[in-house]
């Protein structure tokens, strides 16, 4: 297991800087304002720093040391034990998880369901054991589709790298506010749509997002794919679940989550053949990180470059001297600061930052990687599309997406089709909504969600999917 995180204890001492010109600051301000407005719709409760320590009862088997991330105390539940079970998907511990948005039901059960906080064992990209946290929700609604109640394993979009950003925490507190941090549970909407249809949902926090022993390995395809598949395994053992061995399983995710679900779909035949996978939704998947990096650099989500670098350096410590040699003092400080941030923090602190400001010689990150075979090899190993999913996949990408580039997402569909996979490719046509301010990336997430949920519900009901690979030559 990796060394315990030390950056997680930072709080107010790492205050984000705003180095960009006023005109770009105004664009970032509009973006943050939109995020806050969305939070107002999603959140009925917030988790301030003073209340975080009592947000969950500490498990008797967890460590007693408190971890504070940007003013938010992480519940002791998230401290992994020294020893983990041998089998992937085995539950380490559970406890009740109060949903932040719920109502009393007529039959005495809460709507939309009963949630359980999870910690389970997975295997990381290096082949070592890793404790992953998440949440399982048993729906109150009956499943009206074919077969037993199904399961959706949901991979959240980008939340950040601080433990306070964990998706399972956002289910309890859809809006989390600490000292210089804000986290919004925007994927809760998709979770609740599946619960309303009667499907059970399990959400993974990914490796190191929530669990306090390591940094989150952002966009590491193996870590994310394994964590999602092992979440589906863990869900079957939760007390009170109505899942059966015959329950169909679907994988669902957008953006970072789309990459995780796409990777999991490729890895499932070899890593988790026991998971009864029937379909995968991969929205805006970052399949080619070399290309995605170019879209993120200088964008509203520039801080994500730091999350990637931090995560890959943790997975492969031999990269650290290379990174240190190519970053200046500003870059080194930014990487440390970003390691405890959520999306809102990163937008406020690093929106529209060009990576040249972080490098020792003023070269862009893309130029440095192209000149360093060791760094390029890291990104090449993350390429999704070299393996074939054996169950249907729906891949959606906005044709105007300039953050997680449209062309590389379309190429993933082409790669899978050439391997004979069943792919439903959806090019989402929307007008250009602004240059690198996230709108071209977020708009398809919202406009396509209903169709994505319907497609997944059909697969969970046992309906066959029809591939449109034949149309790829004429698809944008």
Image: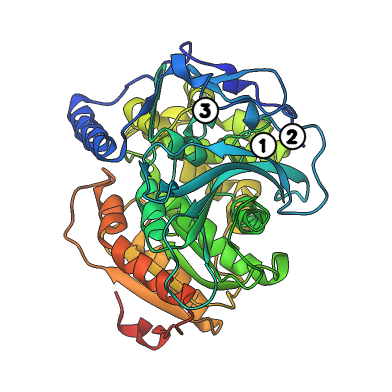
Question: Circles 2 and 3: CB distance less than 8 Å?
Answer: no
Residue 259 to residue 341: above or below: below
Q: Give the structural element (helix, strand or loop) at label 1.
A: helix
Name the mark on residue 401. Answer: none
For the N terminus, the quadrant is: top right
Q: Residue at x 37, y 42 (%)?
A: 102
Asked if residue 176 can be seen in this view, the reply is yes
Name the mark on residue 335. Answer: 3
Q: CA distance from mark 2 to mark 3?
A: 19 Å
Per the image, the residue denoted by label 2 is 2
Marks 2, 3: nearer the viewer: 2
Q: CA distance from mark 1 to mark 3?
A: 12 Å
State which quadrant residue 323 falls in: top right
At which x and y percent is residue 241? 60, 56
Per the image, the residue denoted by label 1 is 314
At which x and y percent is residue 308? 53, 41
Mark closer to the chain start, 2 or 3: 2
Crowding at dot 1, Cα within 10 Å, few <14 / some 14-19 / many 20+, comes out as: some
Horizontal relation, residue 155 to residue 42: left or right: right
Asked if residue 360 can be seen in this view, the reply is no
- Direction front: furthest residue: 107
Residue 346 to residue 278: above or below: above
Q: Give the structural element (helix, strand or loop) at label 2.
A: loop
């Amino acid at each position: 297991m990796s060394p315990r995180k030390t950056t997680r204890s930072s709080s107010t001492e790492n205050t984000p800087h705003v180095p960009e010109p006023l005109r770009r600051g105004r664009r970032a301000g509009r973006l943050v304002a939109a995020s806050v407005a969305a939070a107002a719709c999603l959140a009925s409760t917030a988790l301030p720093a003073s209340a975080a320590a009592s947000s969950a009862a500490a498990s008797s088997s967890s460590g007693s040391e408190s971890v504070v991330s940007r003013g938010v105390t992480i519940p002791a539940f998230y401290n992994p034990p020294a020893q983990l079970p041998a089998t992937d998907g085995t539950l380490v511990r559970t406890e009740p998880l109060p949903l932040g948005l719920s109502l009393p039901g007529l039959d005495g059960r809460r709507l939309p369901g009963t949630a359980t906080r999870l910690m389970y064992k997975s295997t990381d990209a290096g082949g070592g054991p890793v404790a992953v946290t998440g949440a399982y929700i048993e729906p109150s609604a009956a499943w009206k589709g074919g077969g037993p109640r199904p399961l959706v394993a949901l991979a959240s979009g980008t939340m950040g790298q601080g433990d306070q950003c964990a998706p399972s925490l956002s289910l309890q507190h859809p809006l989390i506010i600490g000292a210089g941090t804000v986290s919004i549970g925007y994927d809760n909407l998709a979770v609740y749509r599946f619960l309303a249809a009667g499907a059970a949902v399990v959400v993974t926090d990914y490796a190191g997002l929530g669990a306090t022993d390591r940094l989150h390995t952002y966009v590491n395809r193996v870590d994310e794919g394994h964590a999602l598949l092992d979440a589906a395994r863990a869900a079957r053992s939760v007390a009170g679940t109505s899942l059966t061995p015959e329950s169909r399983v679907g994988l669902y995710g957008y953006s970072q989550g789309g990459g995780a679900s796409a990777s999991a779909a490729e890895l499932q035949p070899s890593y988790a053949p026991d998971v009864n996978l029937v379909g995968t939704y991969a929205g805006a998947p970052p399949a080619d990180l070399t290309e995605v990096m170019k879209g993120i650099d200088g964008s509203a989500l520039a801080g994500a470059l730091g999350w990637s670098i931090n995560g890959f350096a943790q997975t492969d410590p031999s990269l650290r001297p290379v990174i240190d040699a190519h970053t200046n003092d500003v870059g080194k400080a930014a990487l440390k600061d970003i390691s405890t941030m959520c999306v809102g923090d990163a937008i406020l602190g690093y929106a529209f930052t060009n990576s040249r400001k972080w490098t020792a010689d003023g070269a862009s990150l893309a130029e440095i990687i192209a000149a360093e075979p060791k760094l390029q090899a890291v990104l090449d190993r993350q390429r999704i599309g070299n393996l074939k999913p054996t169950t249907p996949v729906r891949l959606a990408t906005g044709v105007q997406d300039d953050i997680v580039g449209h062309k590389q997402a379309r190429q993933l569909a082409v790669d899978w089709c050439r391997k004979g996979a069943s792919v439903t490719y959806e090019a989402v046509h929307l007008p250009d909504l602004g240059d690198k301010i996230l709108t071209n990336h977020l708009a398809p997430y919202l406009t396509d969600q209903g169709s994505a949920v319907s497609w997944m519900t059909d697969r969970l009901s046992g309906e066959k999917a029809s591939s449109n690979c034949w149309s790829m030559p004429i698809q944008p």
